[in-house]
């Protein structure tokens, strides 16, 4: 019998928990953090604040995300997605498109012109590709010995045709993975709106691994130091889990901030002893 051992895992901007945790709870605070980017008028902001207050999103982060945690973190309502009238994420998305029709949920800084993407990632909406996608080129497939089949960064086929009834990984398998391998790395771009970094912080503080819940000490600002650049976000490591937040990066961290992503990968693979 051949045994396989996991030595480490690396994920960027992952979906780890319920939508209400990673999208809804932090959404309005995220807009306030980047008010000059979203450029929403005060009437819209007041409406969003009112919904956040009514739906128990307002003040959630300050009250519950403590180091160490005071206990299990509650859902703000009854739904794991959003209670009726509490879908502030979609409200923000609609309002952002009214101001900036090129608004990209994967990197909020984008405006017109919408740039062609060599990997063909769609942004908020599918875009027409005027050149072959890099990994779909015949010469590239030949050079990397890949099969000559159509390639796309994201499948347009429903990979869960009957749905997915499994629990989110942070509530099921992830704690065991952290405990069983050497290094678990989670990276999150701070300019990502489809999954928000503060939501990932909530997930971590509600997760128990290696005998304790969450990080025991706070994540220090400007603690992620990239060689030749300086501080480019935040970083924290405890009990086999290392978490990075990358400034200016959107959802696809290796694409938007390759140097920072490469450094986190070096740490994962043991080429760097410290993050």
Image (cartoon, grey):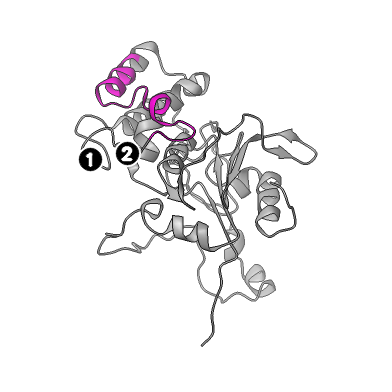
Q: Are marks 1 and 2 in contact (CB under 8 Å)?
A: yes
Q: Nearer the viewer, residue 9 or 239?
A: 239
- Secondary structure type for disc 1: loop
Q: Position of residue 142 (x, y in %)?
A: 66, 75
Give the quarter of the image for residue 173.
bottom left
Q: Is residue 271 left or right of residue 45?
A: right
Distance (Cα) linking label 1 and label 2? 8 Å
Q: Position of residue 28 (x, y in %)?
A: 39, 25
Q: Residue at x 67, y 72 (%)?
A: 144
Q: Nearer the viewer, residue 176 or 83?
A: 176
Q: How many numbered circles does the render carry? A: 2
Q: Is residue 233 left or right of residue 225?
A: left
Q: Residue at x 80, y 39 (%)?
A: 228
Q: Is residue 134 above or below residue 207?
A: below
* The stretch drawn in magenta includes residue 52: yes
| Residue 93 visible in the snapshot | no
- Secondary structure type for disc 2: helix
**Residue closest to the far front:** 211
Residue highlighted by disc 2: 20
Q: Dot 1: within a 10 Å radius of its alpha carbon, few (fewer than 14), some, or many (20 or more) residues?
A: few
Of mark 1 and mark 2, the one earlier in the sequence is 2
Give the quarter of the image for residue 183.
bottom right
* The stretch drawn in magenta includes residue 126: no
Segment tinted magenta in the rendering: 46-70
| Residue 32 visible in the snapshot | yes
Residue highlighted by disc 1: 79
Query: Residue 88 got which mark?
Result: none
**Residue closest to the far right:** 228
Q: Is residue 221 above or below residue 169?
A: above
Q: Residue at x 40, y 55 (%)?
A: 169
Q: Is residue 57 left or right of residue 253?
A: left
């Amino acid at each position: 019998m051949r045994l396989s051992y996991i030595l480490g895992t690396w994920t960027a901007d992952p979906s780890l928990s319920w939508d209400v945790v990673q999208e809804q709870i932090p959404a309005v605070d995220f807009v306030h953090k980047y008010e000059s980017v979203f450029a929403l008028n005060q009437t819209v902001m007041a409406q969003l604040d009112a919904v956040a207050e009514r739906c128990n999103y307002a003040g959630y982060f300050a009250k519950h995300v403590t180091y160490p945690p005071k206990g299990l973190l509650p859902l703000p309502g009854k739904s794991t997605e959003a209670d009726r009238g509490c879908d502030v994420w979609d409200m923000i998305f609609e309002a952002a498109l009214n101001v900036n029709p090129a608004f990209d949920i994967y990197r909020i800084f984008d405006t017109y012109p919408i740039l062609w993407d060599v990997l063909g990632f769609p942004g908020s909406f599918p875009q027409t590709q005027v050149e072959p996608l890099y990994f779909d080129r015949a010469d590239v497939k030949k050079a990397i010995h890949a099969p000559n089949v159509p390639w796309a960064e994201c499948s347009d086929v429903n990979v869960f045709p009957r749905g997915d009834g499994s629990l989110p990984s942070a509530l099921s398998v992830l704690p065991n993975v952290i405990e069983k391998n050497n290094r678990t790395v989670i990276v999150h771009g701070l300019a990502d709106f489809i999954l928000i970094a503060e939501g990932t912080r909530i997930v971590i503080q509600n997760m128990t691994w290696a005998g304790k819940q969450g990080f025991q000490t706070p994540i220090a600002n400007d603690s992620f130091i990239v060689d030749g650049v300086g501080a480019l976000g935040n970083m924290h490591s405890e009990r086999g889990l290392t978490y990075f937040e990358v400034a200016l990066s959107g959802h696809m961290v290796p694409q938007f901030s390759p140097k920072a992503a490469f450094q986190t990968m070096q740490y994962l693979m043991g080429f760097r002893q410290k993050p």
